[in-house]
Amino acid sequence: MDLRLAGHGALVTGSSSGIGATIAETLADEGCDVLVHGRDAAAAAAVAERIAARGVRAEVVLGDLTEPGIAEQVAVTARDFGARILVNNAGPFAEHDWESSRPSDWRAAFEGNVLPTVRVTQSLLPSLRTHGWGRVITIGSRAVRTPLPNMVTYSAAKAAVVNMTTSLARHLAGTGVTANCVSPGVIATPSMHRMFEERAAEERAASDGHEHGDGAKGAAEAAEAAIVAEYAPNPSGRLGRPEDIAAAVAYLASPVADYVNGIELRVDGGITGTP
Ligand SMILES: NC(=O)c1ccc[n+]([C@@H]2O[C@H](COP(=O)([O-])OP(=O)(O)OC[C@H]3O[C@@H](n4cnc5c(N)ncnc54)[C@H](OP(=O)(O)O)[C@@H]3O)[C@@H](O)[C@H]2O)c1
């Protein structure tokens, strides 16, 4: 299917690594020009270089979205770049439970996940309205429907992001701009792999300290399988890949998805377990 994305411009926040980088590269594969965003200049430049190699336009905008004024600056750069597709992907997670979480932890979760989404979206909306077509796609989480007791602040902030998406879609009625959310399950990103490796190392240390079988790689794979079984049991039987999320984003970003509006699209292997 031709997604008819060629020639469109996109900003993907937090695309210097992880899921965001794969979203940026997937949109480029579909012919989009992409504005890569992050805080790490070298990492963002590397992604932009890979995108430009596909023959589309790629630029970089840097900035910490929790700092005053940065979200607005990023949005202005996106407007000037010609971005009509906004992917609000940056959204840090942290582990806190009900007993130990402090007000500052709750504030950080909302300042990292909710406010950047609000501020970049608000700042880019006038140009999307003027253009009469646009896409706002925000990355949620499986924690929206199944709040995680060890990530209470993150779960609540992501729930807010999904809620905001629906009100935004209604607010934008008749403008040609849609707003949707993609909620990933547990995705095997580099940061997730580091977690597997740490767990594998802990397990080795807890046994006899010696490596067995395939060594560190085999242990990491075994740890990943254990994580699927213990932490992320899902009918699809595996962890998600960044490509799974990127494909859903590309679809929602495309003119093909014109009649899909205000939804949360769960790309989680069925882990949520609710209709
Ligand atoms: N991984 C999962 O299993 C999973 C599951 C559910 C939902 N999600 C959601 O999916 C999205 C991407 O997750 P991920 O695992 O790919 O994340 P990640 O690996 O932690 O990626 C973080 C990206 O966001 C940028 N970023 C983080 N905080 C930022 C800030 N304050 N200002 C500007 N940029 C910032 C980073 O930029 P620099 O590195 O350049 O600083 C990097 O490009 C997030 O919204 C996350 O909550 C992930």
Image: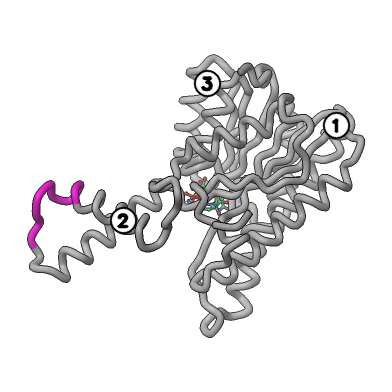
Q: Residue 12's image quarter?
A: top right
Residue 27 placement, left or right of 41: right
Mark 3 to mark 2: distance in Å?
A: 32 Å
Q: Which residue is mark 3?
A: 52
Q: Closer to the N terminus: mark 2 or mark 1?
A: 1
Q: Quadrant of the N terminus?
A: top right
Q: For mark 1, does the 10 Å Cα neighbourhood hold few (<14), some (14 to 19), or many (20 or more) residues?
A: some
Q: Which residue is mark 1?
A: 176
The magenta stretch is 210-218
SS category of the residue bearing label 3: helix
Residue 17 higher or lower than 160, as above or below: above
Mark 3 to mark 1: distance in Å?
A: 29 Å
Q: Quadrant of the C terminus?
A: bottom right
Q: Position of residue 224 (x, y in %)?
A: 31, 53
Residue 203 higher or lower than 38, as above or below: below
Q: Position of residue 114 (x, y in %)?
A: 69, 58
Q: Residue furthest right?
A: 174
